[in-house]
Amino acid sequence: MPTEPTLADANPGDAAEAGASQSVKAQLRLREMILAGELPGGARIAELTIVEKLGVSRTPIRAALMLLEQEGLLQRLAGGGYAVRTFSETDVADAIALRGTLEGLAARLAAERGVAPEVMAEAHACLAAIDATLAPPALDDEGFSRYVALNAQFHVLLGRMVGSEVVARELERVKGLPFASPSAFVMVQTHSPQARDLLVVAQDQHHQLLDAIEHHEGARAEAIMREHSRLAQRNLRAALSGYASGRVHADMPALTLIRRG
């Protein structure tokens, strides 16, 4: 009787790919657990507990822990193992500033080199969708969620505009730093009266950016993206102020990882 093939019988390349896929899934799930507050700042990661919780073997878990250390969410302990990192307000502000610097470079290069018409068309379509999302006088949670998704899409398109895999890869790397993504602090502002106004300002900067790129104004495009990151810095300060007053913990438990001062 023929037997069912097992992982051991599979092509070594297929087995390696399956293991890599498990590591990525474990990495994503662990990141979610950290940012959702399930693994609090300073907590030591119990490897066996994570293995049981995620239902995967130790090998992909260990690979995931190493990747999260490289991202900066975990720190390796002197006695072995990992713990969830905490961050100073300055750490997070620096990560946002670094993203602004790299996005400014990307914008300048895109303006100087020119952008493929199909990519520019996608960028305009993305901004049109954001305009429609921001059209109501007030946004509900669904509207904010839609903005976050579209905003992330636009920033990915900025990386594509450069036509450089090196720049696009480094942009994605810096956006993976803790709290450095373009919409990291948007959702904690959902119930603020000024929330939609800030998004409208950010959207105007998006439009001005495309205008500068299309007119090959590299210095202007770079300056717009650096200024754009300052809005994220403002959102950071607002989020931390709201957390200190007890208003936003439920919206973003990951704020517990940030130390004031």
Image (cartoon, helix red, strand yellow):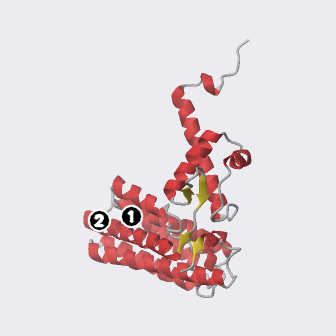
Q: Mark 2 points at which residue?
A: 109
Q: Which residue lies furthest to the front in this view?
A: 79
Which disc number belongs to residue 26? Answer: none
Residue 169 in sight here: yes
Please tell me which residue is depicted at 51% across the width and 30% down the height of the picture. 13
Residue 217 in sight here: no
Query: Vertical placement of 167 versus 19: above or below?
Result: below
Q: What residue type is labelled 1?
A: Met
Q: Nearer the viewer, residue 163 or 261?
A: 261
Q: What residue type is labelled 2?
A: Leu
Q: In this view, does 36 lie to the left or right of 78?
A: right
Q: Judging from the image, what secondary structure is the residue with disc 1 in?
A: helix
Q: How many marks?
A: 2
Disc 1 packing (10 Å; few <14; some 14–19; many ≥20): some
Please tell me which residue is depicted at 68% across the width and 75% down the height of the picture. 249
Q: Mark 1 points at which residue?
A: 120
Disc 2 packing (10 Å; few <14; some 14–19; many ≥20): many
Please tell me which residue is depicted at 53% across the width and 70% down the height of the picture. 129
Where does the N terminus fall, quadrant-wise? Answer: top right
Percent coordinates x, y for residue 236 in the rendering: 54, 78
The reply to whether the C-beta atoms of the residues labelled 2 and 1 are less than 8 Å apart is no
Query: Vertical placement of 48 versus 197: above or below?
Result: above
Q: Nearer the viewer, residue 237 or 214?
A: 237
Q: Nearer the viewer, residue 150 or 188?
A: 188
The alpha-carbon separation of the residues under discs 2 and 1 comes to 14 Å
Q: Is residue 156 left or right of residue 21?
A: left
Percent coordinates x, y for residue 107 in the rendering: 34, 68
